[in-house]
Structures are given as structure tokens and as C-alpha cells.
Amino acid sequence: MSGWLAIAGLGPGDEALVTPEVTVALAQATDVVGYIPYVARVAPRAGLVLHPSDNRVEGERAAHALALAAAGRRVVVVSSGDPGVFAMASAVFEALEAGPADWRDLDIRVLPGITAMLAASARAGAPLGHDFCAINLSDNLKPWDLVERRLRLAVAADFAIALYNPRSKARPQGFARALELLRATCSDDRPILFARAVSTPDEALNIVPLSQAMPDMADMRTMVIIGSSQTRIIPRAGAPILYTPRFAA
Amino acid sequence: MSGWLAIAGLGPGDEALVTPEVTVALAQATDVVGYIPYVARVAPRAGLVLHPSDNRVEGERAAHALALAAAGRRVVVVSSGDPGVFAMASAVFEALEAGPADWRDLDIRVLPGITAMLAASARAGAPLGHDFCAINLSDNLKPWDLVERRLRLAVAADFAIALYNPRSKARPQGFARALELLRATCSDDRPILFARAVSTPDEALNIVPLSQAMPDMADMRTMVIIGSSQTRIIPRAGAPILYTPRFAA
């Protein structure tokens, strides 16, 4: 088989955050597969077939991409951010494991990208500068009890916490419950970063103490970062800097 | 002041993983400040002053960079990986907070990069494809007890765990103790990824079950990723794929 499959991260939105490795793969591709808004970021050209698909069909999309590569096509599956962080890489490997044995012989590469929490952290300062964790707040693929258990343990470990997919129209209650849990276990002044659509024209950053954090400050384009007990704010004339020191007692 | 400071991530080593944003900042800089091997990655040119410094002087290096920017220079502090993950961004903000008040008026940006755990994860498959945490195993800046407490809580939360700085000549014992802790709390077949010098000519990947993981499999250029209880291995003719599914029970 001469086909190949690259699962590529497009970063948070700004083209200046797409790695040259990904740009080269897109230039060599015959097919680009992905969620509609991510495929829309790839410039059309002669010889390139775009396969945009809707949200919540990750499994079918992954199998389609694998089948195209097995048929000899040069396929790039595009994710926003990093494909290995709550994105398409795991969906492709799930489909690979469940699929025909010869898919395992395919040339498959994962091309990393700037994931949303690192773009948000960079814009605000360095809130993830010490030990931290990343939790997907969606309970589409896991029970909500597990989300709460992980949040409690993450607070006990005093990690800074990056929350992916904090809130969507289909799941309006989860983030409100997460904030309640945090209020019961952290001090009122714990800083919370709401970073929306970082590196796009819609970018908006908001840092508030936990006592003032409200569920509707997040939507499906927002990354939420909860500081650890050590996270600090440096006030300035411009936007404040949020960071976690390297040391801990 | 016309000077500025950019704290930039050079990624894990391969130039194809350096973002265009970082490349532009380096092209505009008058001064590059950083640890010797990272500054060595920046091509010399007329008008650019390179300021390489030794390890373990992050605080002085950060203050020097801020002073240069305050004097009107265009300064890039280089980190490997992402500057906000166990790297120079927090050191710069510590120095900023402790320094002269006018440093707070400086134009300071953090330019994200591909951090080591995401490069390692991509090369092996997608072991960080579900909830995960990142722990710096160095006890230079925090007590070892805290490292162990975080490891125990991370296992209890069933996070995949990325260990930065697992082992150095100055700290040969910590990683051995971490493996003992994991053996006491995880099943023998828990997969462990040792990813050394990913994306460089020295790259070497090794996936072993916990029962076969040995302290000397890691050195200071190794990223260690411990799978969660759900992490799977897909055997192939070539290198196996290590990934964590998107769903959890």
C-alpha cells in the first residue's frame, strides 16, 4: 500500500501556530477528513478532496479515513489543537483496533499541535507552570461521577486544572456542578481563567476569583483553567499575568 | 520603552515542530537568552546577540532578559518544548514580580510550543487521549513527599501520567521510588512509555509493562508516560501503538 494517514493538529486557530510538519503533510495530501470547521481551515486546491463531517461522528470519520488510506490515498485527519488531547487520534486508534487486520500495516503518524490549554495558558501567563492535569468535562463518553471524582482528587493533589469542553448546549449543568464542587473544596480567591477562542478574532480572556465564577462565563469555545493554591496574579496597567511558580512547599 | 520580551517554545528538537510565530519572533529579536543547548538551536546572524547560560540559573537568566527588554532590546527567552510547562515562563514571572515596578509595563508575550509529553504521545500513538496529568519528578523545587502524594492521587484518579524530568545524575533515586509506588498501586501490566529525545537523531521509544520497567530506562532526556487503567496496546508488525480510548466506564 502506498497510502498513508496523518492525524494532524491545527492548533487553536491562528495559522502562525500551525507547525511546518503539519503544513507539509497537508501539501502532500490527497484527502482531508475532519469536523466541518476544521476542514474549512484547509485551503482547497486541485487534486485535494475535502471530506467535512458533522460533530459526534468521530468513529465513522476515523474508519472512513483509514479506509481511504488503505485504498492508497494520502489522508490527513485534521483536529483543532493537538490530535492526541481529547481529539481525533484516539478515535482513529479505536477504529483501527476494531477494523480489518490489514489496517494495522498502514503508515500512520500523529502530528502534534498546540493544544488549547497551552495556548490559553500562554496568553494568560503561565498558570500551568507547575504540576497540572487536564480533564474533559463532557460526560458524553464517561459517567459524570467519574468527572467529579477526578475533580476532587485533582484539588486534593493541588494540581492546576485545565477543563476541556466545560459547557455545551446539550450539557448545561455539568460546569455549574463542577463550580459547586470547587467552591466546597477551594478558597474563595482561587483564580479561574476563562479563555475563549484563543488566537482567533473572537479571543476573550477573563480571570476571576472562584467566588465570582459563573457557569455562563464558559461555552463550547472556552478553555477553563483553575489555578492551584499557589497560582498568583501580577496586577499591571494592562491585562494581569496569571502564573504558577515553579516551587512548592 | 520600545523593547519587548517573548518567552518562546522551540518544541522537542525537530525544526519542523517550531511554530511560525516563534520563527518570526526569533527573526525580529536583538537578543536570545536561554540554557546553552537551546540557544545553540538559534542560527547566529549579524545584529543578534546570543546569551547562553548554564542550567540551574533560571532566576538570574530571567532577570537578565527582563533588564535587557527594559533597556529597549527585543528579547526572546528560548525554552525547549512549551515555555509554560516546567520551563522558563514561570521563572520570568517570578523575576518580574520580585523586580522593579517598571518591568510590569513591559510588552511580554508567551509563545507556546510543542511540549515534550505531546511529542512523545504523538510518536507512540495517543496515550494522553483521555484525562491525564503532568508531574515534574524533580524535587529541586518541591519536597519529595509532595511528589509521592500527587502520584498516589493521580493513580487514584486513574489519570494517564506524564513524568517530566524523571531522573538525573543528581537525583538517581526519585524515579526508582516512583516505580515502587506505582507497583504497589497499579497492575503489573500497566503500560509505561519511555520516550527519549523525541524528534531528534537520538530518538528511542520503549513500551514495557510496569513489571518490567527499570529505573535506568530513563535519563534526563526521557519523557515517561504511565498509562491509565484503560490504556491499550495495538500490536503490529512495526512499532506497537499505545493509546487511551476516549470513553471510560
Image (cartoon, coloured by chain):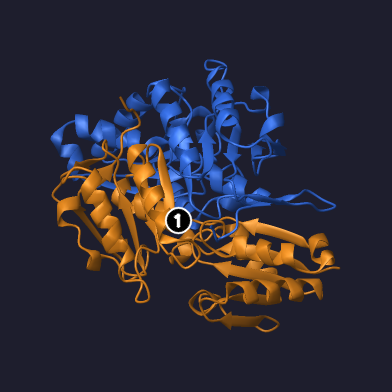
Chain colours: A orange, B blue
The answer to whether A125 appears left or right of A84 in the picture is left
In this rendered view, identify the residue nearer to me: B235 or B211.
B211
* Image quarter of residue A68: bottom right
* Mark 1 residue element: helix
- Give, as a three-letter code, the residue at label 1: Glu
* Image quarter of residue A45: bottom right
- Residue shown at 23%/43% (left/top)? A186
- Residue shown at 56%/60% (left/top)? B246
The answer to whether A238 appears left or right of B192 in the picture is left
Circle 1 sits on which residue?
Answer: B21
Confirm whether residue B50 shows in the render: no
The answer to whether A223 appears left or right of A237 in the picture is right
The image position of residue B57, as x and y in percent, is 39, 22
Which quadrant would the C terminus of chain A be assigned to in this image?
top left
* Image quarter of residue B221: top right
Confirm whether residue A228 shows in the render: yes
The image position of residue A131, as x and y in percent, is 40, 37
The image position of residue A76, as x and y in percent, is 65, 69
Which quadrant would the N terminus of chain A be assigned to in this image?
bottom right
- Residue shown at 48%/52% (left/top)? B131
- Residue shown at 48%/77% (left/top)? A37
Q: How many marks?
A: 1
In this rendered view, identify the residue nearer to me: B223 or B46.
B223
In this rendered view, identify the residue nearer to me: A222 or B11.
A222
Q: Is residue A18 above or below residue A189?
A: below
Q: Is residue A142 above or below residue B32?
A: below
Query: Mark 1 packing: few (<14 Cα in 10 Å), some, or many (20+)?
Result: some
Subunit of label 1: B
The image position of residue B61, as x and y in percent, is 36, 28
